[in-house]
Image (spheres, grey):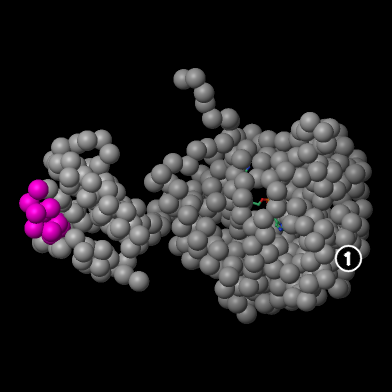
Amino acid sequence: MPFQIPRGTQDVLPGETEKWQHVEQVVRSLCGRYGYEEIRTPIFEHTELFLRGVGDTTDIVQKEMYTFEDKGGRALTLRPEGTAPVARAFVEHKLYGSPNQPVKLYYTGPMFRYERPESGRFRQFVQFGVEVLGSSDPAVDAEVIALAMHIYNELGLQHIRLVINSLGDLDSRRAHREALVRHFESRIHELCEDCQARLQTNPLRILDCKKDRGHELMATAPSILDYLNDESRAYFEKVKHYLAVLDIPFVVDSRLVRGLDYYNHTTFEIMSDLEGFGAGATLCGGGRYNGLVQEIGGPETPGIGFALSIERLLAALEAEGGELPVRRGLDCYVVAVGEQAKTEAVRLVYELRRAGLRVDQDYLGRKMKAQLKAADRLGASFVVMIGDEELESGAATVKDMASGEQMKVPFGELAHVLAKRTGREE
Ligand code: HAM
């Protein structure tokens, strides 16, 4: 084979793309209901944005970024995530000055991470995400989580679990950080090199280490929840209260630290409960990031959001045996026999398409029988047949493929009759 797709990427072929479109449409429509508007940012950004935004001690920044120098000598990076770019756009376009606060945004598009590919883990994957900037109301945390859950519910996923945690404010994190250093310090040599390097720079990251996940020191590490100050605890209680009001079940896991540095207060993940999912089990992740906008040069602005990948969502749906209501197939296939009929077919197909129908015709010079077979394969609901007799009488033969019923319909009435019969009538 001359060329193969790059490792960790995938082609989405017809048959699958309809599912993607369906998911995208559901997500867009739900965002509309919740009052979120779409933002589109570039696929690459200045590398510095992610160093500052995502954090230079994270795996994403240290190991996974697709970074390159362009011909002008600029250091650029294919975006590994969408939050830092949205925060950059928020600052650059001064959206903090907009009269509509908080600013509620959503985005969808490819993200790139140089990760070890396995099931559910790609090097290019499509994230859908939302970000709310400008409010530190815990009801917003609940809204954002509710929207994520709503998406999975709407698409029919049953076996999901919401896990939440709080990383507290700066003070709480500082106290926890000191406790972590004390906990790991004397035995840090038992952990991997990355953990050793992170002991002083960012000990919270040690809890997120993929290599040492099973080490005894991880299980006994001090819990952030024991270090929350009164304010942070009260905030977390409010978030839980609102989730209870919304009847959204959750479990609290104090070890949920997330892989990006910008988080404080609420963090959450939605996992698939089905077995055998491995890396793909985390369907969605998010949390609050009250310091990010300031970190990248904007005014102090609280923020919260989440992102989910469509690849993992579809894999979870498939594993659960869920069917998406996707519609493939044509409304009508026009079968023509003879040169004159062919000309009429070319005209008619265009007319029917303009009337809103999904229509196709033969382009391979096939005989009538083969054209009928093609119509069947393409899932056409109706076949319109045109031959000498039809041309002479001015009425086409229309066959309802489901019932086998045949009728004559004058050419001028075809668009109307077919639109009515297929439910595509305006
Ligand atoms: P994240 O946890 O890095 O968070 O990614 C969010 C989601 O993206 C994951 O839960 C997973 O569904 C998907 N994902 C991540 N990496 C891969 C991969 N290699 N292959 C397939 N899917 C993947 C963020 O990206 C944050 N920006 C989320 C956020 C938004 N926090 C606040 N606002």
Residue appearing at x 80%, y 46% in the figure: 50
Please state the horizontal and vertical placement of residue 283, each as a whole percent of the image: 58, 53
Of the 4 image quadrants, the one containing the C terminus is bottom left
Position above or below: 13 against 287 = above
| 227, 19: nearer the viewer | 19
Residue 409 falls left or right of residue 45: left
Query: In the rendered image, which residue does mark 1 sit on?
Result: 300
Q: Residue at x 52, y 53 (%)?
A: 313
Residue 99, x across and y down, in percent: 78, 76
**Callout 1: helix, strand or loop?**
loop
Describe residue 35's horizontal placement relative to residue 415 as left or right: right
Q: Which residues are magenta?
A: 388-399
Residue at (91%, 63%) from the top-left corner? 171
User: In the rendered image of this protein, does residue 296 appear above or below residue 416?
Assistant: above
Neighbour tally class for label 1: few under 14, some 14-19, many 20 plus, Cα within 10 Å: some
Q: Say whether residue 391 is magenta.
A: yes
Question: Along the horizontal axis of the image, is 26 left or right of 130?
Answer: left
Magenta region includes residue 234: no
The image quadrant that residue 120 belongs to is: top right
